[in-house]
Amino acid sequence: MGNRLRDVVGAAAGLALASPALAAAAIAIKLEDRGPVFYRQRRVGKDGWDFDLLKLRTMVIGAEAHGAGWAVDRGDPRITRTGRLLRRLSLDELPQLWNVLRGEMSLVGPRPTLRYQVEQYTPRQRRRLEVKPGITGWAQVHGRASLPWDDRIELDVWYVEHRSPWLDLKILAKTPAALFRGTYKGQTGGWGTNSALKSPRPDSSGASRRPTRNPE
């Protein structure tokens, strides 16, 4: 109940504070191509239940049918001019505060992924579905999309196994700095077969060891 209260209060306050930025972004998106402001994508939540993730639209309409499909390449031509700024500042994620109010997401937790990705999870990796997906998480403050996919999942599983109010506060405190890191995921959207570190383990202080990575 404590986490739910935190989520509701935090999401409501976040939406109130972000409303001017959301309004400005909505106007910019509309002026650029007159398309829809919001983008809905089916994602997998707690216990494997599907829900519609909300984002500000940053790509051309029907982008999934072109280019890299679900993945986003560096300098992807499908990203609109407005979208590049929104993605760089992570403002496109703000509508997910509504997902938090609806109880589909939490402020802190593993990022929600697509069904085809979940179907490839190992039994250990499926542990990340034991909690609600979050707007930010342990993997996001330890490298975000710059980490290989397997490494990010392992960090998420570690969070599931060690989650606590103190750890959530630590993640929230580290999130502002992480927001300014890039969101490029490569041609596979981070869903690659090679991972430089199969099981990154946090050290005794709770901090994750920095993994070594193969270049994309």
Image: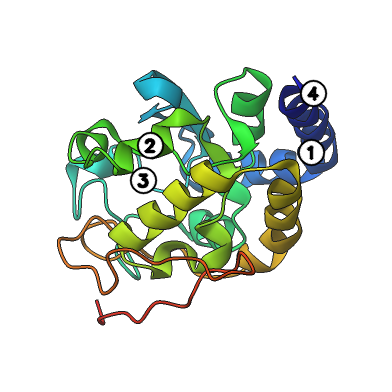
Query: Which residue bears the numbered disc 2?
Result: 127
Instruction: Identify the mark nearer the N-term, 2 or 3.
Output: 3
Tell whether label 4 touches label 2 (CB within 8 Å).
no
Question: Sequence order check: which comes first, mark 2 or mark 1?
Answer: 1
Are the residues at dot 1 and dot 4 in contact (C-beta closer than 8 Å)? no
The residue shown at (53%, 67%) is: 142
Q: Using the image, tell me which numbered label, if any, was put on residue 5.
A: 4
Residue identified by numbered label 1: 14
Q: Is residue 153 above or below residue 212?
A: above
Of tags 2 and 4, the one toward the viewer is 2
CA gap between label 1 and label 3 equals: 27 Å
Numbered disc 2: secondary structure: helix
Q: Position of residue 195 (x, y in %)?
A: 23, 68
Kindly identify which residue carries mark 3. 60
Q: CA distance from mark 2 to mark 4?
A: 24 Å
- Counting residues from the start of the chain, the first of labels 2 and 4 encountered is 4
Camera-nearest label, 2 or 1: 2
* Quadrant of the rendering where the C terminus is positioned: bottom left
Residue at 47% x, 43% y is 111
Q: Position of residue 180 (x, y in %)?
A: 62, 68
User: Label 1: how many residues lie within 10 Å, few (<14), some (14-19) or many (20+)?
Assistant: some
Quadrant location of residue 67? bottom left
Q: Residue at x 80, y 35 (%)?
A: 10
Amino acid type, callout 4: Leu
Circle 4: element type: helix
Looking at numbered disc 1 in the image, what kind of residue is underneath it? Gly
Q: Earlier in the sequence, mark 3 or mark 4?
A: 4
